[in-house]
Amino acid sequence: MFDTILYGLTIGAILYLFSTGLSITFGTMHIINFAHGMIYAIGVYLFISLLPLLWGSFPLSLAVAVAAMLPLAYLVERFVIRRLYGDGIDYAIIATYAILLIGTDLIKLVWGSGPKPVSDPIGIPIQILGTTVQTYRVVVFICAVAVFVALRMFFSRHVIGKIVVAALKDRDGVRSLGLDVNKYFSIVFVIGSGLAVMGGVLYAPITVAEPYMGFHVLLLAFAVVIVGGMGNLTGTFFSALGLGQVIALTGRFYPAGADTMVFVVMTLVLLKEPIVDLLRRLVGKHGIGNFS
Amino acid sequence: MLRVDAIDVAYGYAHVVHRVSLGVEPGEMVFVVGRNGAGKTTLLKTLAGFLSPVRGVIDFDGRQVQGMTAEALARQGMRFVNQDKKVFADLTVKDNMELAAYACGESLDQAVERLIGMYPKFASFLEKKAGNLSGGQREILLIGRALVGEPRLLLIDEPTEGLAAIVIEDIFRILRGMKHKISSVIVEQNLSVVSRLADRILIMKEGEIAREIADPAEIADVAALESWL
Ligand SMILES: Nc1ncnc2c1ncn2[C@@H]1O[C@H](COP(=O)(O)OP(=O)(O)OP(=O)(O)O)[C@@H](O)[C@H]1O
Ligand SMILES: [Mg+2]
């Protein structure tokens, strides 16, 4: 059982790293950014190519892959996302989905369409609570917690983080101080993209890399962002870990239903308001009490 | 300092400001008064760069600035305080000042010191979430934020709107303290405040400047001002 929970925490950690950027982009630009899946997938393939060139060093290849994807993320933000600002969510979906498709075909062109495995960089199991578990999975979870803490510090202590927090609710107020809001939104977009690449690379040894990996993680991440509250980074963290458990526990008893269960939970969260509302109305109508 | 020449402003097809011209001299405090919906906010937002005029010229310190972004104008020394008294609610009072200080490279200590000089109560509120401040305190924080970095022109939209009489006096004292030190255009409905502070009054009606009052005796006569609205 403990290994199932740990697996859930690992999946949750990966989902958190990926979803953060999606949530940030929704909060700042009000855009659903499918191109996030492209950055994630290309980042992982780049990592796979870098690994043999960088003496097989996992952390070094991870760092270089993340760094290398930042300029590409910046270009996507500057020339696609920013231009779509205020143009309605449908245009954004079409344009960023196109980028995801282009990225996927690019991967097939450069790296081929077959799956590419990545081996566990640690490989040594450890004993926790009498169960043998993969050390690597524990490390992945710790990485996600560290990122969560670092992001919280960034948004509450660093002046750039504070500017973004202020601009989320009062864009014009920040502009009237003479600050170019776009520049700061761009910075957090790039940070979010870097975290997605990190998530993708950390996930690779647990599954395999394949050209459509961006699509799969995007679907799950939408559920994470919706359950966690769009643009709410703390909510995203707990929702990712929660849905990670949903995947792991469902997968243990009914493997085919693991992903589906995530969307069942998402639907329940989305329906919560209308259901509560309906109950209130019904109760109100029968004169038992009026909550509104 | 500021010259506005025959600007028209529209929201889509709705023309709201018609051929407005005005000038502000260095150190002058100009008030804009007028009924609800007269176009005062629209005019101020246009001067601040949040809206672009469809026609006309805005000259700030010898440069044509119509069509320039609000952030660029703020960096040139023009600061705008919105009508809605919206502060950065999730940040502390000190953080609010920090962003302003960061934006113009002033030291935070100096900015905070000036704010406390303006309104000593802030000394004990620095770590308080700005969202928890009263309406009057929020307005003072916004003015304090706008004054960071020694701007040359301040545009303030209805600073006393919705405030209790004694708080209005606090705002009045702060505005009086700014007089002759900085140029300003202030939209204000409280005619007692206007008549005690104004160097000049522009009366706005249906998107036009219907009348300009510069004679001190006329400015001092609140009842007469009332009759122009
Ligand atoms: N975003 C907008 N889109 C369309 N019309 C607008 C918009 N904002 C304001 N208006 C219209 O423009 C006119 C002038 O509005 P404005 O806010 O400038 O008036 P005001 O003089 O500041 O009024 P108040 O005293 O209520 O603040 C009004 O008729 C208003 O309905
Ligand atoms: Mg107004």
Image: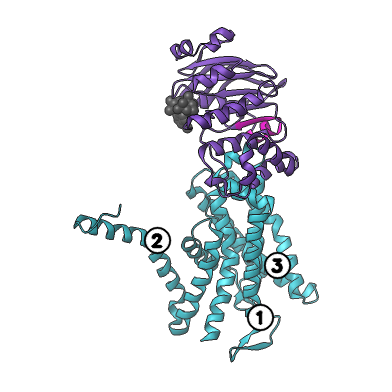
Chain colours: A cyan, B purple
Q: Judging from the image, what secondary structure is the residue with disc 1 in? A: helix
Is residue B181 found inside the magenta-colored segment of the image?
A: no
Q: Quadrant of the C terminus of chain B?
A: top left
The answer to whether A65 appears left or right of A94 in the picture is: right
Q: Are marks 3 and 1 in contact (CB under 8 Å)?
A: no
Read off the residue under disc 1. A136
Provide the residue span drawn in magenta: B70-80
Read off the residue under disc 2. A270
Residue at (65% x, 46% y) in the render: B94
Residue B148 percent across, percent down from the top left: 69, 36
Read off the residue under disc 3. A46
Specify whether disc 2 shares its chain with disc 1. yes
Is residue B77 found inside the magenta-colored segment of the image?
A: yes
Label 2 and label 3: CA atoms lie apart by 37 Å
Residue at (73% x, 61% y) in the render: A68
Q: Nearer the viewer, residue B66 or B199?
A: B199
Mark 1 or mark 2, which is nearer the start of the sequence? 1
Q: Are marks 2 and 1 in contact (CB under 8 Å)?
A: no
Residue at (54% x, 30% y) in the render: B159
- As drawn, A85 above or below A41: above
